[in-house]
Amino acid sequence: SHSQITRLYSRFTSLDKGENGTLSREDFQRIPELAINPLGDRIINAFFPEGEDQVNFRGFMRTLAHFRPIEDNEKSKDVNGPEPLNSRSNKLHFAFRLYDLDKDDKISRDELLQVLRMMVGVNISDEQLGSIADRTIQEADQDGDSAISFTEFVKVLEKVDVEQKMSIRFLH
């Protein structure tokens, strides 16, 4: 809605310390919730297209749209129209890309270990983390390539309420 966009723009301009109509990674790192989030850097990177170090308001809105909760009245929208950015499928793609560090459309054991390490810090030994990564891949990997494809990722999360878990009510 118009009022939501106005509030988002107000938030955008408050983050824009350079007052140049774009946000840098440093602007995002000043957001306390991202600064303390173990995946904060990965989330921040999602705002920036490949090779870019600034994001304008349109790009800011596009990325945030993934996190908009799905309202009941949206579930019956035009099935032939483009899928909204906050659809289950797009939320899953967004989450998958947080893990797929090298962008090869697979989550390898190494990538899983890196993300797990970001999430748990030094509270768990490398051996325990390796065991978690191995078990996760073993459970998810259906084609025997020792990695998790997007299809396998979706299958593992089929019973998870992604719509709720990946929603931020940042405008209420």
Image (cartoon, rainbow, N blue to C red):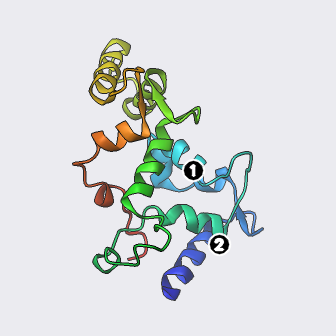
Q: Distance between the residues labelled 2 and 1?
A: 19 Å
Q: Residue at x 65, y 70 (%)?
A: 57
Q: Name the residue under label 1.
A: 46
Q: Residue 111's x, y, as percent?
A: 48, 27
* Residue at the image point whose x is 45% and y is 54% from the top: 33
Residue type at the position of mark 2: Thr
In the rendered structure, the answer to whether residue 171 lies left or right of residue 51 reads: left
Pointer 1: residues within 10 angstroms few (<14), some, or many (20+)? some
Q: Where is residue 29 in the image (x, y as percent from the top left)?
A: 58, 50
Residue sitting nearer the eye, 153 or 47 = 153
**Percent coordinates x, y for residue 104 in the rendering:** 57, 33
Where is mark 2, residue-wise?
13
Residue lying farthest bottom?
A: 2
Q: Quadrant of the C terminus?
A: bottom left
Closer to the eye: label 2 or 1: 1
* Mark 1 residue type: Ala
